[in-house]
Image: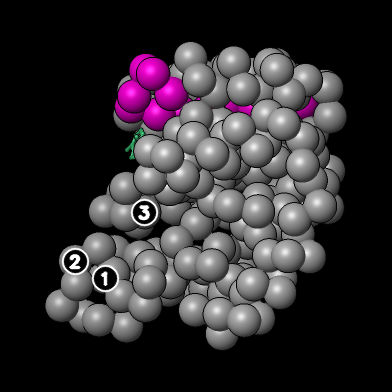
Amino acid sequence: MVEPSIERYLSDLAAVDDEPVLLEMEELARSKDFPIVGRLCGRFLEVMARTAGAKRIFELGSGFGYSAYWFARATGPDGEIHLTDSDPDNERLALDFLGRAGLDRPIRYHVGDALSSLADTDGTFDVVYCDIDKQGYPEAWRQARRRVRVGGLFMCDNMLFHGSVLQPDDDLGRAVDETNRAIAQDPDWRSFINPTRDGVVAAVRLR
Ligand SMILES: C[S@@+](CC[C@H](N)C(=O)[O-])C[C@H]1O[C@@H](n2cnc3c(N)ncnc32)[C@H](O)[C@@H]1O
């Protein structure tokens, strides 16, 4: 969405972390063509979670733990991070990667439907982060908005969805657009979509 040379410039600035496990996760994503959030979004997640003083985080759609890597950096060792994915192989990979990176905070990996796992988990969260299939975005927002503490964050990736939010005949684009509008118009929340990569929203709960 951002002019490519500017996006490259921003990515280069962000490319200072070269821990072997991080590079290994990025190589796995490349080789399997698996959609991780990448450096720019990852650092944004970490910065926002640190700013919110986040300790308890719930991720909807975790894959093999790349986005959780950035959240785990933010929470410190006393964080509690819930990961979810329908694919059991991803649990094994995520626990191995995060363990070897020294980021094995108390982690609970829920295998199954992400929104059912959220419903089955008690309490509120400092951050709920969403990266599931796009048709689930409106319901993810409806559920998550009640589960973030006041002052906490709802964050969600792909909020521009390659520009398809502008195309009314695109079902998935419409689902993302509906979610964007619901967040932006919610009087209990203030939000901003960072337009780098595919757009990631950071919304803070006011009351
Ligand atoms: C885009 S990837 C997540 C990437 C991850 N957030 C990262 O950046 O490392 C989406 C993942 O969510 C899972 N997924 C999608 N919809 C889901 C749902 N409704 N419930 C559980 N998992 C889901 C997919 O299996 C996939 O692994």
- Marked residue nearer the N-terminal end (2 or 3): 3
Q: Which of the labelled discs sits on residue 174, or is there none?
A: 1
What is the x, y in percent for residue 174? 26, 70
- Marked residue nearer the N-terminal end (1 or 3): 3
Q: Is residue 176 shown above or below 70?
A: below
Q: Secondary structure at mark 3?
A: helix
Describe residue 170's horizontal placement relative to residue 56 as left or right. left
Evaluate if marks 1 and 2 touch, with contact meaning CB atoms under 8 Å apart. yes
Quadrant assignment for ligand 1: top left
Residue 63 in view of the camera: yes
- Say few, some or many: other residues with alpha carbon within 10 Å of mark 3 (under 14 / 14 to 19 / 20 or more): many
| Label 2 sits on residue | 171
Distance between mark 1 and mark 2 Cα atoms: 5 Å
The segment highlighted magenta reads 79-90
Reply yes or no: does residue 89 show up in magenta: yes
What is the x, y in percent for residue 46? 74, 48
Describe residue 119's horizontal placement relative to residue 204 as left or right. left
| Label 3 sits on residue | 137
